[in-house]
Image (tube, grey):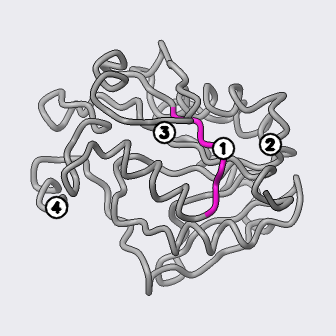
Amino acid sequence: MTRTEGEIAGLVLAAGGGRRLGGRPKALLTHRGRPLVEHAVTVLRAAGCERVHVVLGARSAEVRQRAELPGCVLVDNPRWERGMGSSLRAGLDSLAGTGARAALVLLVDQPGVSAEAVARVRAAYRDEGSLVSAAYDGVRGHPVLLGAAHWGGVAESATGDRGARAYLRAHEGSITLVECGDVARAYDIDTEADLGHLE
């Protein structure tokens, strides 16, 4: 294991209940024959993340039963209905004390984000003060790499469905943008119409 493999942990936010999808948890939507949460973990591992933490919420027992997530740390977020911010806080909290110096955050409902895009963001890591974001035609998107020096501030500002958005906006000048528009598509699976993106 190289130095950065141990320091950069993958963090999948997969707790959403799919309110606009008739209450179908996004983690269990099928993509290429497997649940989306498995796809996200596979992408992170292919990009070089040895340690992967997965935050679960809606129907977490069913996700644990149906998805194959060997070697992952599964984190239950009992407050998942409060939005993505609570899941991000739960995920960062689960990484405290593990030796991880950065969290590479991937959203379960963005299957168009490729391992190559994740690897590009990961490669821009320098130290615990790193803030790195994928960009699509210059516009900031996911995945996002959060150095451990920022975890406290991110957790403090992560409320509702905003996740790290407020913190990143306040630290715009410190973010390294990595263009990924040539190797990934940053759509979300939020509505019934979006299901057409799944294979």
Report the label total.
4
- Per the model, the C-alpha gap separating discs 3 and 4 is 21 Å
Task: Please provide the residue range marked out in magenta.
Answer: 48-54
Which residue is under mark 4?
A: 199
Q: Is 21 inside the magenta-drawn segment?
A: no
Q: Report the residue at 41% width, 22% height from top.
A: 57
Which label's residue is closer to the chain start, 2 or 4?
2
Q: Badge 2: how crowded within 10 Å, few (<14), some, or many (20+)?
A: many
In front: 153, or 128? 128
Q: Report the residue at 39% width, 46% height from top.
A: 108
Q: Is 53 inside the magenta-drawn segment?
A: yes
Residue 148, image x and y in percent? 82, 44
Which label's residue is closer to the chain start, 2 or 3?
3
In front: 111, or 154? 111
- Per the model, the C-alpha gap separating discs 1 and 2 is 9 Å
Which label's residue is closer to the chain start, 3 or 1?
3
Which residue is under mark 2?
A: 100
Q: Report the residue at 27% width, 42% height from top.
A: 35
Circle 2/circle 3 CB separation < 8 Å: no
Q: Is residue 156 above or below residue 197?
A: above
Q: Which mark is residue 13?
A: 3
Dot 1: element:
loop
Q: Badge 3: how crowded within 10 Å, few (<14), some, or many (20+)?
A: many
Which label's residue is closer to the chain start, 1 or 2?
1
